[in-house]
Amino acid sequence: MHTDFLMGNEAIALGALAAGVNVVAGYPGTPSTEVLETVAKRKQGNVYVEWSVNEKAAMEVAAGAAYAGARALVTCKQVGLNVASDPLMSLEYIGVKGGMVVLVADDPGPISSQTEQDTRTFARFSKLPLFDPSGVQEAYEMIQEAFELSEQLGTPVFMRPTTRVDHGYEAIEVAEPAEWKRNEPEGFVKDSSRWVIFPRLSVINHAKIEARNAQLADTFSDSPRNFVLPEQGSVVRKGIATHGISYTYVSDNLDEADRPRVLRVGTPFPFPERKAVEFLSGLDEVLCVEELDPVIERALISVCGKYGLTTKIRGKLTGDIQPSGENTVESVGKALASFLGNEPQVNGTAATPAPQLPVRPPVLCAGCPHRASFYAVKKAMGKRKTIYCGDIGCYTLGNAQPLDMVDTCLCMGAGINIAQGVFHVEPDTTCFAFVGDSTFFASGITGVVNAFYNQANLTVVVLDNSTTAMTGHQPHPGTGRTMMGEVVQKVSIEAVLRAIGLTTVETVDPLDHKLAVETVRRVADEPGVKAIIFKSPCVVLARPQAKSHVDAHECIGCQRCIRELGCPAIALKDGKAVIDETQCSGCTLCEQVCPVGAISGGERL
């Protein structure tokens, strides 16, 4: 063992390696991404790692590996679990042979997600055990326990870190690579009575799952991951029930010499009922501090009803804890102070309000080719009746002024189908659907097939910057490389679109503004489903050395470059446009937009 200063996701990855993981599959999504990346970087021996095309594919790849006796890990974020839930709900009934952990990084806030979903609630829905770490060291240890439990029970097991655990740092004790477990998969053993799901098998296994979970709830009551800290000092007959990172916030706000009884729940499903009864004994009221759903609160209410306890349970349902959003040290301190009737404390001292952080709205990077793509479509369509259906990725930021080019955004791949729905109701609307290259492979292809088959009229715009940019530039099928470091044949987006049946598929550089506008005008007027692939590399990965600059003598101060593009590298000074060379990528878009040719010096890739 040795001490290492690690991010939570790095610790989880090393914990999986220490547990003898054989196969890791996932789809990038903040805050989960670094887990798979760290496995790929730190793995030794015969460990297979892949970025799958989406979370459903990752779940099925991991299931196949676990059928063969491998220890398998799936990584995703909470919205990715929605995509993976189809195979997972059946896999719960079928079970696995090797240990299989489904790591779902929840994002309270949400900081970088469409939703605030709580995987603890999904665990109850899917009837699968769940581990909920409170810090980096525990996350490292818990994932190893999760593999052991999964193998013991023959079932997938959830691991649910949240953003502050995923991206928190801590000096922790980790095993040396020589100490890592070596798991040798037995291989797949044919047995259709076990691996082929039929209604009769599901009925039998459902009953077994319910019995297993009842026993597991009792087992979890003895787990060190669920513990009660006895009250200290003058605070009696009041308790705090909490979990995850909220336990850390509670600890930061309590005086060790004078604190109420505390229940920390590390395995919220199956709920450790016997431990909860022990905690509730003799208490008049309990405050449940949790994020996001009132999972512990509801469980304790149920325990009180079942055992005839009169303890009053307070939390989200009673308005004592905020019903949504991320908990903080300050918000928890305020709730505890109100509950306990004292001043907010942080580590035993009176808390001072934190200053308000400045608002920093997200914008497309200076030189981002997506800005040029959106601008070309906007100029080409002018005042025509249009709808611009967006998708999940960097290009969602095309909704910001002055571009204002994202009218809808729901979930990955939805924009193409939403555009079809609008067309069938308003056939006089010119419909565009924007999708990124990674998202196209993840969930966009089926939408194009649906549009073509059902005779929609829309233009699919693929924003191809040759990477999965928003989550950290991971490879995808169109990049020609895998997470194992292999160079493979690229999957051609144009070839896929033509194979579906599209006859009009145009590839154009969006930074060639005149050609891009002409292409959009021509293609948009064609009937049926057609596609434009705007292909230009992400500016973060391919940054030219040339910089654009403004000739102050030529600039007429019309501000067109500022008002129409919204590039963060361009500002106004003394009535003239100026370019911040530290941000400028020399993409030349502003040079092409300037009506008097006052901007020059850039060099398009």
Image: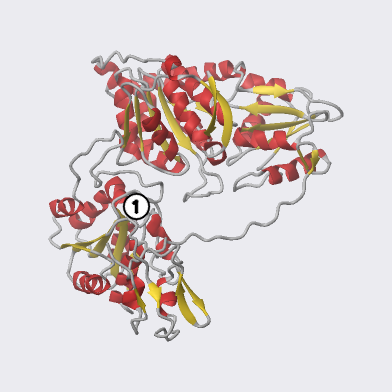
Q: How many marks?
A: 1
Front-lying residue, 408 or 436 = 436
Residue lying farthest right? 234
Residue 374 in picture, x, y percent from top left: 34, 67
**Relative horizontal placement of residue 203, taking residue 158 as reference (left or right):** left
Residue in the picture at 79% in, 42% down: 337
**Front one among 133 and 242:** 133
Colour pattern:
secondary structure
The answer to whether residue 473 shows anywhere in this view is yes
Q: Where is residue 400 shown, x and y percent of the image?
A: 45, 66
Above or below, 220 against 429 in this view is: above
Quadrant of residue 387 in the image? bottom left
Provide the residue designation for mark 1.
541
Q: Residue at x 65, y 28 (%)?
A: 264
Residue 133 showing in the rendered view: no
Query: Does dot 1 land on a helix, a strand or a loop?
Result: loop
Q: What residue appears at the point 37 percent right and 70 percent down from the top-left corner?
A: 548
**Splitting the image into 4 quarters, where does residue 82 fall?**
top left
Q: Which quarter of the rendering shows the C terminus?
A: bottom left
Q: Quadrant of residue 265?
A: top right
Along the horizontal axis of the image, is 333 left or right of 246? right
**Residue 122 located left or right of residue 448:** right
Image spot of residue 317 (x, y percent): 66, 42
The amino acid marked with disc number 1 is Leu
Label 1 crowd (10 A; few <14 / some 14-19 / many >=20): few
Judge whether 473 appears above or below 299 on screen: below
Tell me residue 427's x, y (percent): 26, 70
